[in-house]
Amino acid sequence: MKKMVKGFTLIELMITVAIVAILAGIAYPSYIDYITKSARSEGVAAVMRVANLQEQYYLDNRNFATDMTKLGLAANPFVTKNGHYSVGSAGTNAYTITATAKGSRDTTCATITMTSAGVKGPSAECWK
C-alpha cells in the first residue's frame, strides 16, 4: 500500500515564489507611478488655489500679491497639506506660481508652474 504524503515539494514551493516575484516585479513600478501621480495632483491643486487667490486679490487691489500672507496663506512659500510640494508666487503686474516637489520621487514634474496669462508648465503631462 502507498503511503499518502501531505505537504509541498521544494519544486512546488519554488514555482510559487517565482510567480509571486514576477507579479511583484510588475505591480511595484505601477504602484510607485500611482503614488507619484497622486502627490502631483496635490501640487496642481495648490497651484490652482493660489492662482484663484491671486485673481481675487487683483480684483480688490488692482495688482497681484507679492507675499502669500496677503492671500491668507501661512507663509511664502507654503507647504501643501501632505507636505509633497512647496508653493510660492512672485510678481506684481503679473504672477508666476511655482510648486516644487519635496523629495526626489517626481523627476518628471519636479516643478509645476502657472503664469497669470494661463501658461502651464513644464509639460501637459504634469497637469493630467
Image: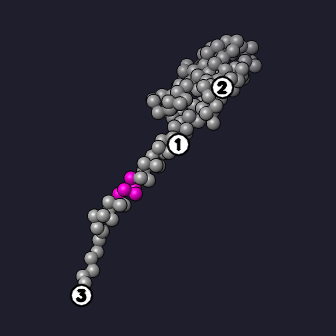
Q: Identify the secondary structure beneath mark 3.
A: loop
The residue that mark 3 highlights is 1
- Looking at the image, is mark 3 or mark 2 earlier in the sequence? 3
Expressed as whole percent of the image width and height from the top left, the position of residue 112 reads 58, 26
Does residue 54 belong to the magenta stretch? Answer: no
Amino acid type at circle 3 is Met
Q: Which residues are magenta?
A: 17-21
Q: Position of residue 52 (x, y in %)?
A: 69, 26
Calculate the distance from the C-alpha at mark 3 to the C-alpha at mark 2.
78 Å
Give the structural element (helix, strand or loop) at label 1.
helix
Asked whether residue 14 appears in the rendered view, the answer is: yes
- Depth check: 103 or 12 in front? 12
- Tell me the residue at 63%/18% (across/down): 96
Residue picked out by circle 2: 120
Evaluate whether residue 70 shows in this view. Answer: no
Badge 3, how many Cα within 10 Å: few under 14, some, many 20+? few
Q: Residue at x 50, y 45 (%)?
A: 30
Which residue is identified by label 1? 34
The quadrant where residue 63 appears: top right
